[in-house]
Amino acid sequence: MILGICGSGRKEGNTGAIVEEVLKGTESETELVWLIDLNVGYCTGCMRCASEGNCWQKDGMTDLYKKIIDCEAIVIGSPGYYGDVSGLVKSMMDRSIALGYMGIGKESKTPMHGRKPLAGKPAAIVSTVAGHGFERPLETMERFVSYGEMKLVGKLGAVVGMQDVRELKNVVDEASKLGAKIKEALREKFK
Ligand SMILES: Cc1cc2nc3c(=O)[nH]c(=O)nc-3n(C[C@H](O)[C@H](O)[C@H](O)COP(=O)(O)O)c2cc1C
């Protein structure tokens, strides 16, 4: 399953439309998760995950951890908010620090340096903005991808103005091509 994670609260909005187009382009089994539906609490920075092997918070992230680990590839989308990712995406990324410690528990010999359970997983990142500045949201998500040692397949930033992104054929085409690249990356990985 290829997992899409959308960090916009607008289900008819631009970011979700682009994530959906990328997922469609993979021609694979996909699932789109809307962070707005999940009730994801903030990372408190307690680092209990590093000693306990799990996050103490039981909320929308609990199921999402499993989906992130189990999926074959991941597509993350964020609207640009004040030049960076949305709070929903930031919280999801922050909480994902626990992924590196899951299953390590108290036996961990390297408690401050978790595992990289997402290593090698193909990932794509997309961001839409009204006017300008999709670079930083992409950079922030790229940092998350690279920390997890995932394989960045591609990124897509789109300036949509007041339009509906579905009307911007070049952006839709690019999203679809990005999906095809994920499919190709998976073929390479599993051949
Ligand atoms: C809180 C907030 C901050 C925003 N900041 C920016 C910004 O810095 N630059 C910009 O071009 N658009 C900004 N926008 C506009 C959105 O990035 C843009 O409309 C985006 O396509 C919305 O995605 P969505 O339709 O998926 O919700 C902002 C919107 C909101 C709600």
Image: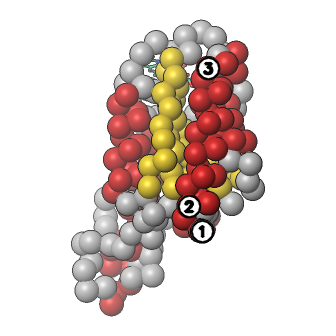
Query: Mark 1 and mark 3: span between their CA atoms?
Result: 31 Å
Query: Mark 2 and mark 3: span between their CA atoms?
Result: 27 Å
Residue at the spot 43% in from the left edge and 65% down from the top edge: 119
| Tag 2 near tag 1, CB within 8 Å | yes
Q: Nearer the viewer, residue 30 or 151?
A: 151
Residue at the spot 64% in from the left edge and 39% down from the top edge: 22
Residue where numbered disc 2 is placed: 188
- Number of residues whose C-alpha sits closer than 10 Å to that of mark 3, classed few (under 14), some (14–19) or many (20 or more): few
Q: Specify the quadrant of the image occupied by residue 16.
A: top right
User: Is the shortest distance between ligand 1 and the CB of mark 2 under 8 Å?
Assistant: no
Q: Specify the quadrant of the image occupied by residue 147.
A: bottom left
User: Is the shortest distance between ligand 1 and the CB of mark 3 under 8 Å?
Assistant: no
Residue where numbered disc 3 is placed: 170
Q: In this view, does 121 lie above or below 112?
A: above
Q: Where is residue 37 in the image (x, y as percent from the top left)?
A: 66, 45
Earlier-in-chain disc, 1 versus 3:
3
What secondary structure is marked by label 2?
Answer: helix
Residue at the spot 35% in from the left edge and 31% down from the top edge: 136
Instruction: Give, as a three-letter code, the residue at label 2.
Output: Glu
Single out the mark in the foreground, 2 or 3: 2
Q: Position of residue 68 (x, y in %)?
A: 56, 61
